Image: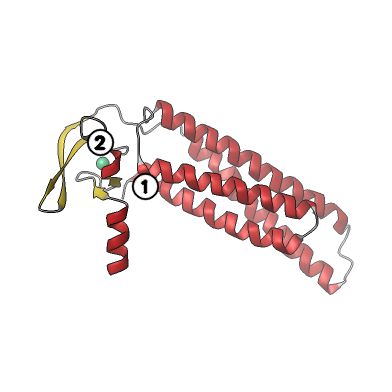
């Protein structure tokens, strides 16, 4: 609890009084205001006796919430295909270990490789749609939550490229391990994205 408190302090968190999404006091613009990315509240953060107090001055009518959410749709390609590719690899592992003939196993290897490549391409496209959303719908405003999503996305691309490379040089076990981490990072990015859609 104490550690968590310290962590919150470092991130300079402020809670939107209307929708309760976590914002960062670092997000304020030159006028000292931050617009909540979820509910559009125009918030001024004043400091009083070491406490950060969010004060709502106005509510923007234009919400960044898109009706047609290309980003949220696109993200499911990566989220959906990676576990499929991983399950196929587990199956392949046991089929090889048991030494039983279970059809043409050679075909599964390039298929897994293809799936992993699609996950990477899907990830890049998802990132691109998210980036465009940020620039247009969120007007390129500085939000720590979006910054964190971008940072984690970079980690994800490194992991996915690494996993594909390891798969290519037939270090399947290490590739699989990297894919587990990549799956965790995808979950993390999606979890953060959920706050931007539903608040908290
Ligand atoms: Zn809000």
- Distance between the Cα atoms at labels 2 and 1? 16 Å
Report the number of discs: 2
Where residue 33 appears, x then y in whole percent?
22, 34
The answer to whether 80 appears left or right of 55 in the picture is right
* Label drawn at residue 34: 2
Quadrant of the frame with the N terminus: bottom left
Residue 20 in the image: above or below residue 130: below
Q: Residues within 10 Å of mark 1 (few under 14, many from 20)?
A: some
Q: Is residue 83 visible?
A: yes
Query: Residue at horizontal 31%, vertical 67%?
Result: 3
Residue positioned most to the left:
49
The answer to whether 65 appears left or right of 71 in the picture is left
Where residue 21 appears, x then y in whole percent?
29, 47
Judging by the rendered image, the residue that carries numbered circle 1 is 195
2 or 1: tag closer to the N-terminus: 2
Query: Residue at horizontal 88%, vertical 60%?
Result: 103
Residue 167 in the image: above or below residue 153: below
Where residue 187 appears, x then y in whole percent?
50, 54
């Amino acid at each position: 609890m104490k550690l968590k408190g310290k962590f919150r302090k470092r991130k300079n968190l402020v809670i939107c009084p209307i929708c309760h999404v976590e914002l960062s006091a670092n997000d304020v613009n030159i006028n000292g205001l931050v617009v909540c990315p979820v509910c559009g509240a125009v918030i001024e953060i004043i400091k009083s006796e070491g406490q950060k107090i969010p004060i709502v001055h106005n509510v923007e009518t234009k919400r960044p919430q898109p009706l047609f959410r290309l980003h949220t749709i696109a993200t499911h390609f990566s989220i959906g295909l990676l576990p499929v590719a991983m399950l196929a690899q587990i199956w392949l592992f046991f089929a090889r270990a048991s030494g039983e003939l279970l059809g043409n196993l050679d075909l599964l290897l390039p298929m897994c490789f293809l799936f992993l490549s699609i996950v990477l391409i899907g990830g890049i496209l998802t990132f691109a749609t998210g980036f465009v959303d940020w620039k247009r719908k969120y007007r390129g405003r500085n939000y720590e939550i979006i910054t964190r999503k971008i940072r984690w996305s970079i980690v994800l691309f490194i992991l996915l490229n690494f996993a594909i490379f390891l798969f290519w040089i037939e270090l399947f076990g290490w590739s699989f391990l990297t894919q587990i981490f990549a799956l965790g990072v995808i979950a993390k990015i999606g979890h953060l994205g959920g706050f931007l859609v539903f608040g908290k």
